[in-house]
Image: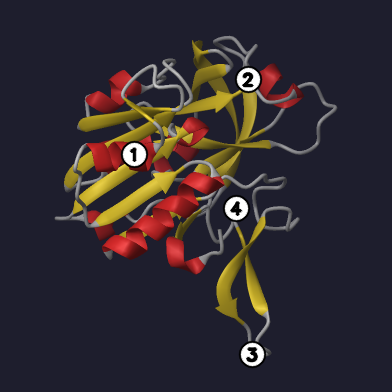
Amino acid sequence: MAKVKEKASVVSQEMLAEGIYSMWIQTEQVACQAVPGQFIDLYCNDGTKLLPRPISLCEIDRAKKQLRIVYRVAGAGTREFSQYQPGDVVDILGPLGNGFPLEEAKGKRIFLVGGGIGIPPMLETAKQVTGHKQIILGYRDSQMFLKDEFEKTGAVSIATEDGSAGIKGNVLDAVRAGGLEGDIIFACGPGPMLGALKEYAKEKKMECFISLEERMACGIGACLACVCQSKEKDDHSQVCNKRVCKEGPVFRAEEVVL
């Protein structure tokens, strides 16, 4: 699948929660190629920031050739993005990385798990995956962005850190409280959450695929800023690192060290 750099235009922009924004982008080619779990590089327009910002794809509308990204304002670049208005032109590169292996979940009981800003990429995954879906989402508090959209795709269990909604605790607390059982896990979120899911999957003998949220720079595997340690070793018994943006961001959980 060839990545494409193109000029796209902003279709709409809205704030979903404090610091969380949703943007629909009109593309010519990228949306037609993208799959759940991939991301795009979005470039700033002010000319002072050379490196793009990698942002996961939340929804893909191939018929309209549109992509939805949901992102958290975390610095100058994403703050600039949050100011874009419909009609503004943006430079994007994509689709990038490897998505979730949807075929692995066919006919299985699947946990779709998202935590924090790792929640958005699970929405398109939930829309496209086939099988018995159980969606588990972890939030800090009651600002549960995208919850309504997820509920249109399947049953949703909620965990919040402060207990203001759903189960108080983390996503695994929600799994245990609901007595949920599954065969395979697709997940995206912070490292500690993914590490806990990896151990849970091993204990329950479940397959587990995780999307890592490493900080990236180039997004195409050239700068090596996003390497993670893998379980593989080369011919000299040296550990082989993997580039999250190139070999990932989705890995089998047992492939990588968390």
Q: Is residue 257 left or right of residue 180?
A: right
* Mark before the other along the chain sequence, 1 or 4: 1
Secondary element type, mark 2: strand
**Label placed on residue 235:** 3
Badge 4 amino acid: Cys
What is the C-alpha distance between the residues marked 3 and 4? 24 Å
Secondary element type, mark 3: loop
Asked if the residues shown at circle 2 and circle 1 are in contact, with their CB atoms under 8 angstroms apart, the answer is: no
* Mark before the other along the chain sequence, 3 or 4: 3
What is the C-alpha distance between the residues marked 2 and 1? 43 Å
User: Which residue position holds label 2?
Assistant: 89
Secondary element type, mark 4: loop
User: Which residue position holds label 1?
Assistant: 173
User: Which residue position holds label 4?
Assistant: 245
At 69% from the left and 31% from the top, the residue drawn is: 43
Q: Is residue 64 left or right of residue 80?
A: left
Asked if the residues shown at circle 3 and circle 1 are in contact, with their CB atoms under 8 angstroms apart, the answer is: no
The nearer-to-camera label among 2 and 1 is 1
Badge 2 amino acid: Val
User: Does residue 136 lie above or below 236 as drawn?
Assistant: above
User: Does residue 99 lie above or below 233 as drawn?
Assistant: above
User: Does residue 107 lie above or below 145 as drawn?
Assistant: below
